[in-house]
């Protein structure tokens, strides 16, 4: 609708985070650009959850909001065969249950073999600030009309969701000396496996806390809050609640943590992460000024809540093509998700499948055991969502296999097979894989002597060795890491021949140290694949199988799972229902 807002970050100026960082690395491994743009525009990098096991490590970057949008625009305009047109789509052209194009506000009919809807929070968007309501897709931008009505006419079920954003503060009016500094990693990494852009001169974030005075002011304003007076009807995000929700649901807490995040290198605008609100602007301002360091704070703009239309994603195939209209695809918040990363991954998969559909190729689907992207889409299509869906590591059954460090090992060969991988990326991947394989083999074959390691073992409180011992066996001890063994004489020839690749070394250490857990998870994947490979005919009549529970029959008929594996993950379908299905499938 406005080409000046391509790549505009609607909410916080950050990419990645818990499980979301894994998604960005998966997009990168498949040839997408999210990681590359993030690397070019980040002002701070942190690897979260480093105190936990590698399955939980998640990269996060603080981004320069203006630079981020600028780099996306430059990148997109550099792609041959990508055309641009600024307009609002007001209707869909559907003929015989197949998409044929779109109609715009200017009255243009644009023919198309496939259409992908990525509407964000714009579909009939309504913004709330206290008792004030106005139409909008986000602050300062118009809402979109017509598409929802066109989809309802075509038979789609719809709902309303709600999300919110905090106020933005003039950083010149904050006393940062009274806040806790939250610096980036001392040795920052990159999101992209190409490792082309590494952040320099990181800018710190800060941490502060609400207090009882803040809570009292906010609570006194609840009668003016659209969250509490019934004006907002849409479901809000459970895992990113407003400050009103926090002080209501967690009354036992007398303070809540707030992250003070810079919006960029060349602006004083500050994002107050953790203070999402739709209270009147004067109450927001008064409450914020009760936080130490914010006594003189001035608002650039108030926080607000926004309601918008979404379409329950059980109406989609795993390719993100709709079940009701052929060649029509949905991606992002139209499917009930929240977050840049979740939206980006859906956009990539929908784009691939739209191209595949035109070419007559089979749908491209990432399985749950192949990536967080697969978990995300399978959850949406199989289980649906009645609140904004956000990705967490806990949603993945195979998170030891789906780590952020090995996204390229998992998905780059797949990206290459569908033509999305450049020669440069392929060369980098092959180099890293060869290095990792050779280093793992060396660790399993070479020994370390007592003289080389015992003094280290003693310092760490580990039992000493009396004979030469395999490097892999020493490395498998919980307190030891690669830095403790990398000076072993038996590794000299390896490093002299190959140099030092930190990513491959980290990969090798994880593969050796967690080998037992990784093997167990691979066995679980084999069991998963057995059910996943049993197809269910498209017109299978569940209503005739009375030995399946009535709820099971209803859910199976509604969702029409493609495989027994997908059927087993539908809420309301019991293990006994699956056993009955297996019998009917001749298994």
Image: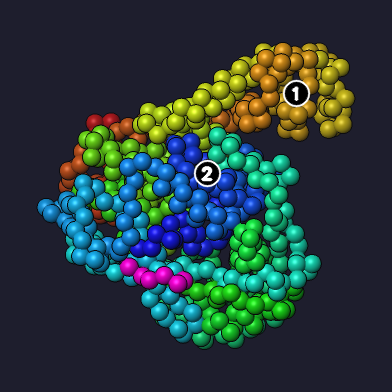
Instruction: Give the image quarter of residue 349.
Output: top left
* Real-space CA distance between mark 2 and mark 1, rounded to the nearest whole angstrom: 30 Å
Instruction: Give the image quarter of residue 141.
Output: bottom left
Q: Which residue is mark 2?
A: 35
Residue 36: give x, y in percent of width and height: 52, 43
The colouring scheme, among rainbow, by chain, secondary structure or one colour, is rainbow
Vertical order, 105 against 558 (above or below): below
The residue shown at (39%, 42%) is 79
Q: Which residues are magenta?
A: 139-144
The image's mark for residue 486 is 1
Can the viewer see residue 293?
A: yes
Vertical order, 272 against 450 (above or below): below
Query: How many residues crowd mark 1 within 10 Å: few (<14), some (14–19), many (20+)?
Result: some
Per the image, label 1 sits on a secondary structure element best described as loop
The residue shown at (20%, 61%) is 108
Per the image, label 2 sits on a secondary structure element best described as helix
Residue 381: give x, y in percent of width and height: 34, 50
């Amino acid at each position: 609708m406005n080409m000046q807002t391509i790549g505009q970050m609607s909410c916080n100026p950050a990419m990645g985070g818990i499980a979301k960082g894994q998604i960005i690395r998966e997009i990168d491994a498949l040839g997408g650009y999210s990681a590359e743009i993030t690397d070019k525009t980040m002002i701070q990098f942190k690897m979260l959850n480093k105190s936990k096991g590698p399955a939980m490590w998640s990269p996060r970057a603080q981004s320069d909001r203006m630079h981020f949008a600028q780099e996306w625009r430059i990148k997109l305009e550099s792609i041959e065969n990508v055309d641009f047109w600024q307009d609002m789509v007001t209707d869909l052209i559907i003929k015989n249950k197949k998409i044929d194009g779109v109609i715009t506000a200017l009255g243009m009919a644009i023919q198309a073999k496939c259409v992908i809807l990525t509407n964000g929070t714009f579909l009939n968007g309504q913004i709330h600030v206290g008792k004030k309501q106005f139409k909008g897709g986000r602050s300062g931008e118009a809402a979109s009309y017509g598409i929802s009505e066109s989809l309802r006419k075509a038979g789609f079920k719809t709902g309303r969701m709600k999300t919110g954003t905090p106020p933005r503060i003039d950083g010149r009016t904050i006393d940062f000396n009274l806040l806790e500094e939250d610096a980036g990693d001392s040795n920052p990494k990159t999101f992209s496996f190409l490792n082309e852009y590494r952040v320099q001169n990181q800018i710190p974030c800060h941490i502060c806390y609400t207090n009882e005075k803040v809570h009292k002011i906010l609570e006194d304003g609840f009668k003016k809050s659209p969250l509490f007076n019934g004006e907002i009807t849409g479901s809000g995000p459970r895992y990113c609640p407003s400050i009103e929700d926090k002080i209501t649901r967690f009354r036992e807490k007398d303070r809540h943590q707030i992250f003070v995040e810079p919006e960029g290198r060349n602006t004083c605008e500050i994002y107050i992460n953790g203070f999402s609100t739709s209270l009147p602007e004067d109450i927001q301002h008064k409450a914020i000024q009760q936080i130490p360091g914010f006594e003189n704070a001035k608002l650039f703009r108030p926080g607000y809540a926004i309601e918008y239309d979404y379409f329950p994603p059980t109406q989609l195939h795993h390719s993100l093509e709709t079940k009701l209209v052929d060649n029509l695809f949905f991606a992002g918040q139209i499917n009930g998700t929240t977050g840049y990363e979740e939206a980006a991954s859906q956009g990539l998969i929908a784009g691939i499948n739209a191209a595949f559909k035109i070419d007559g190729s089979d749908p491209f689907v990432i399985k749950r055991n192949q990536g967080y992207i697969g978990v995300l889409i399978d959850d949406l299509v199989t289980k649906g969502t009645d609140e904004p869906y956000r990705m967490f590591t806990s949603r993945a059954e195979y998170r030891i296999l789906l780590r952020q460090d090995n996204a390229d090992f998992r998905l780059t060969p797949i990206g290459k097979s569908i033509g999305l991988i450049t020669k440069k990326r392929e060369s980098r991947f092959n180099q890293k894989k060869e290095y990792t394989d050779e280093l793992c083999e060396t660790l399993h074959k070479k020994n370390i002597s007592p003289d080389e390691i015992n003094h280290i073992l003693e310092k760490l409180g580990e039992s000493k060795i009396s004979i030469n011992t395999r490097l892999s066996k020493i490395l498998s001890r919980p307190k030891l890491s690669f830095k403790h063994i990398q000076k072993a004489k038996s590794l000299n020839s390896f490093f002299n021949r190959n140099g030092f690749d930190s990513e491959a070394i980290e990969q090798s250490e994880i593969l050796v140290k967690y080998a037992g857990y990784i093997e167990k998870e691979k066995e679980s994947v084999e069991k998963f694949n057995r059910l996943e490979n049993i197809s269910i005919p498209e017109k299978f009549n569940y209503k005739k199988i009375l030995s399946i529970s009535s709820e099971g029959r209803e859910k199976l008929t509604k969702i029409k799972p493609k495989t027994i594996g997908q059927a087993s993950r539908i809420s309301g379908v019991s293990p006994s229902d699956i056993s009955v299905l297996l019998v009917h499938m001749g298994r």
